[in-house]
Amino acid sequence: MTKPAIRCAIYTRKSSEEGLDQDYNSLDAQAEACAAYIASQKHEGWKCLPSRYDDGGVSGGTLERPALQRLLSDIEAGRVDMVVVYKIDRLTRSLADFAKLVDRFDAASCSFVSVTQAFNTSSSMGRLTLNVLLSFAQFEREVTAERIRDKIAASKKKGLWMGGLPPLGYDPHPDTNRRELVINKAEAETVLRLFTLYLERGCLNATARAAAAEGLRSKHRCFTSGRTQGGGLLGRGHIHRILTNPIYRGQIRHHDRIWPGTHSAIIDEVLWERVQVQLQSASARQRGSQHPTGSLKDATPDAPLLGKLRDETGDLLTPTHTQARGRRFRYYVSNRLISAGPDPKGWRLPAPALEAAIVEVIAGHLETQATRHEVLQSGSATEQASAAAQVQGMAKSIRAKGCAVIAHAIASIEIIQDHLHIRLDRTAIASLSGLDGALLTSSLLAFQAPLSLRRRGVETKIIVGSRAPKPDRTLLRALRLAHRWADMMKSGWSLKDIAQTEARSESYVARLLPLATLSPSLQQAIITGTQPVELSLEVLVRSSLPLTWSDQERRFGLTA
């Protein structure tokens, strides 16, 4: 039986241009060796493509090579089944880049062969070698990340400014080699005035109104691209961040540690302490304040998110309720809608839907972090796996018991445009999970979640988990294999022959083959990445597919 042709592309590279002008150069020698190897595999159906992919005088330390990019385009277009090189370092000298390339090859069902190093990803031994190399690549990435984090921590401990956008009142030092900030005198006056206004008014909302009346503005930035940013009115949240930023006291913050900075302070110690005491006092009064029973300002006792929610202006969302037709309806409302009257930018959110949405996004985030083993900053594989299991258990408990379980572990939630910015309390999460709080990763405790809010200022429908289309590589690869194997069976191949040729088990081939009969709408959704979130390869292969396409679409949630 004739085996299907495997289209082989030869890739060659030479770092220097020396000798490339000769009639027979290094690229020709590499190509000749690769062609001979392909010819030796003719009985396996290997066929050499006429086009050559030669990068002469290009370093292997970058992937931005003309011939390599052309090769990758042809692979993703389905015109290449096998990449053949003389040595692995001809493809790349970077393990991290090698891992990226193999991922792209694998997504397009393309294999990789090094003719002088017994490396072939179409065989089980080749895949084992690949896994070893990928392990070293992962190690290299993690060591690099740790080195960068350590450098930033050490630099901030010395009081150095480690880049980013400078805050209002400061500019980067004119000497780009100096890691420090210099005072912008005009902006420093704005900062000082904000501190003074807050002491005079004693309230962030009143301070924001006074700042607007005096024409105080946020920092105006002009980027090299020509884009501008800032220069607008200062909201309540922005002012709060300024009043609590230790950089104005001449200090540098790194996570929960504060170090003396090398820059000059704008606010003296006496003014700083007075503002901090007043902020803490106002915060305590706000949490403990009581309103007349039955009024719109009544903070209902069943409002677990009391004091946790703020909108993009920094305004607190206050729990309220109304009575209609004998039923009680709970809401979280921007405080200014109560204290200052109508505001089209204020939020009025139904409490049950918002609480359920927050429970879902927090539980989903915790599960994702656990799946990625991004729970602890350090620890052995066993410790990481145990921590992941504990966090997954905590996520299940949150889903089962609702918002009351996780509310005390929420430090703050900001509703900004179409996202929730959520910060979890380290100590509370440590208590819930049974883990050491000092070892928890920052990505576990602070994250963003997409949130779709249909209407604003009146009743709002909350939709969680809106996402941009993102194709599932595993599903795409399985779909390609299913169609290829189905075509082979139509040509007379047996299941056993396909399994042997593809180096797969017969049961694996048999499980994937039915995917070729999926409804065209389902297949198109998989290709474009618009399939339902819960539709995975495991769900498909473990399900008995309905015979009709319409039933398949209903079964997997594509249609109602």
Image (cartoon, rainbow, N blue to C red):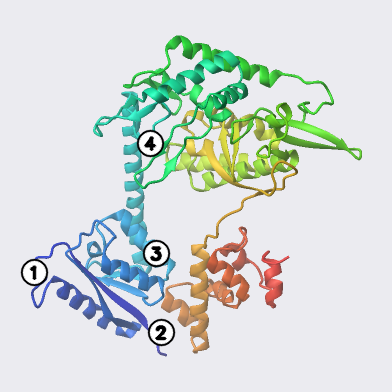
Counting residues from the N terminus, which is met first, the one under dot 4 or under dot 3? 3
- Residue drawn at x 60%, y 64% is 531
4 or 3: mark nearer the eye = 4
Q: CA distance from mark 3 to mark 1?
A: 32 Å
Compared to residue 546, the image places residue 93 above or below, namely above
Residue 290 visible to an observer of this rendering? yes
Kindly identify the residue that appears in the image at 55 percent across and 63 percent down: 529
Distance in Å between CA atoms under marks 2 and 4: 55 Å
Task: Give the x, y percent position of residue 349.
Answer: 72, 40
* Number of other residues with Cα within 10 Å of mark 1, as a class: few under 14, some 14 to 19, many 20 or more: some
Q: Are marks 3 and 1 in contact (CB under 8 Å)?
A: no
At mark 1, the secondary structure is: loop
Q: Secondary structure at mark 4?
A: loop
Q: Which residue in the structure is indicated by mark 3?
A: 104
Q: Which residue is mark 2?
A: 4
User: Closer to the observer: label 3 or label 2?
Assistant: 3
Vertical comparison of 115 with 169: above or below? below
CB of mark 2 within 8 Å of CB of mark 4? Answer: no
> Which residue is label 4 attached to?
164
Q: Residue at x 59, y 46 (%)?
A: 418
Give the amino acid at mark 2.
Pro
Nearer to the camera, 30 or 189: 189
Question: Decide: marks 2, 1 in contact (CB < 8 A)?
Answer: no
Question: Mark 3 near mark 2, Cβ–Cβ under 8 Å?
Answer: no
From the top left corner, tell me how far across and down residue 435 is, in percent. Answer: 53, 32
